[in-house]
Image (cartoon, rainbow, N blue to C red):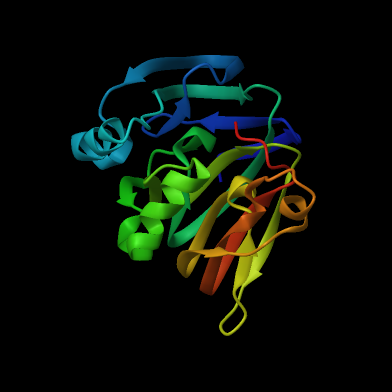
């Protein structure tokens, strides 16, 4: 794994010759060694099709290709950082939450409606999260950002997990999602936050939840 957690808001990445990383532009804090940073216009390993998909959705997050030999410190906006290791599976994550990831991972874009049908489309329009979600697949590591830290909540068969859509960060595993409705206590007292709508995840996997309802 190329990432080492320095503290809750900074990570150190090891860059080696012949390998590369991708990071969000503006996330580099400092570096040592012979390291180059190049604006990436190919949409990562997913190529042009991946980039076009996100741009159509208005969700393209500018990336930098990081190459060379040395170490790089990454952080952004004082957000908490969670490093997620993938062992051949697929991570589904909102594009603006990506801080950095292995160049070996295959990047793509998934239309949320394909997982949740009409409800998937409703989720994007009601919660403010996009209809398109970035996917990263393969063996490697991903650093994601969140407000107030992240916890991992297991998703097991016959026991779905309900998440406030504003607190959702990412998930991986054999998981399906849909939007469900419920009357939350905040709606009853007139605040009217997002609790009337919940993201229901079922199957077998893990969902990452931030300790805040604030978007990045």
In x, y percent, where is residue 158? 58, 85
Residue 137 visible in the shown view: no
In x, y percent, where is residue 85? 55, 53
Name the foreground residue: 19 vs 43. Answer: 43
Residue 16 visible in the shown view: yes
On the rendered image, what quadrant is the C terminus found in?
Answer: top right
Name the foreground residue: 156 vs 2. Answer: 156
In x, y percent, where is residue 191? 74, 43
Total tally of numbered discs in the picture = 0
Residue in view at x 68 percent, y 59 percent: 152
Q: Looking at the image, is 22 positioned above or below residue 119?
A: above
Q: Looking at the image, is 121 positioned above or below residue 38?
A: below
Name the foreground residue: 159 vs 18. Answer: 159
Residue in view at x 47 percent, y 69 percent: 175
Q: Is residue 133 left or right of residue 198?
A: left
In x, y percent, where is residue 82? 65, 43
């Amino acid at each position: 794994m190329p990432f080492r957690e320095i503290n809750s808001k900074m990570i150190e990445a090891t860059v080696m010759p012949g390998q590369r990383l991708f990071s969000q532009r503006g996330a580099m804090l400092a570096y040592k060694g012979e390291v180059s940073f190049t604006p990436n216009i190919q949409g990562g390993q997913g190529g042009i099709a991946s980039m076009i998909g996100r741009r159509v959705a208005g969700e393209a997050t500018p990336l930098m290709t990081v190459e060379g030999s040395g170490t790089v410190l990454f952080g952004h906006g004082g957000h908490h950082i969670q490093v997620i290791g993938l062992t051949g599976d697929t991570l589904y994550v909102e594009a603006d939450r990506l801080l950095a990831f292995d160049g070996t991972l295959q990047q793509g874009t998934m239309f949320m409606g394909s997982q949740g049908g009409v409800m998937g489309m409703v989720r994007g329009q009601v919660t403010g999260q996009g209809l398109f979600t970035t996917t990263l697949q393969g063996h490697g590591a991903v650093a994601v950002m969140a407000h107030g830290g992240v916890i991992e909540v297991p998703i097991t068969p016959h026991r779905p997990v309900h998440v406030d859509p504003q607190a959702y960060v990412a998930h991986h595993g054999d998981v399906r999602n849909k939007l469900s409705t419920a009357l939350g206590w905040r709606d009853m007292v007139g605040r009217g936050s997002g609790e009337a709508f919940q993201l229901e995840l079922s199957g077998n996997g893990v969902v990452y939840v931030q300790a805040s309802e604030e978007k990045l």
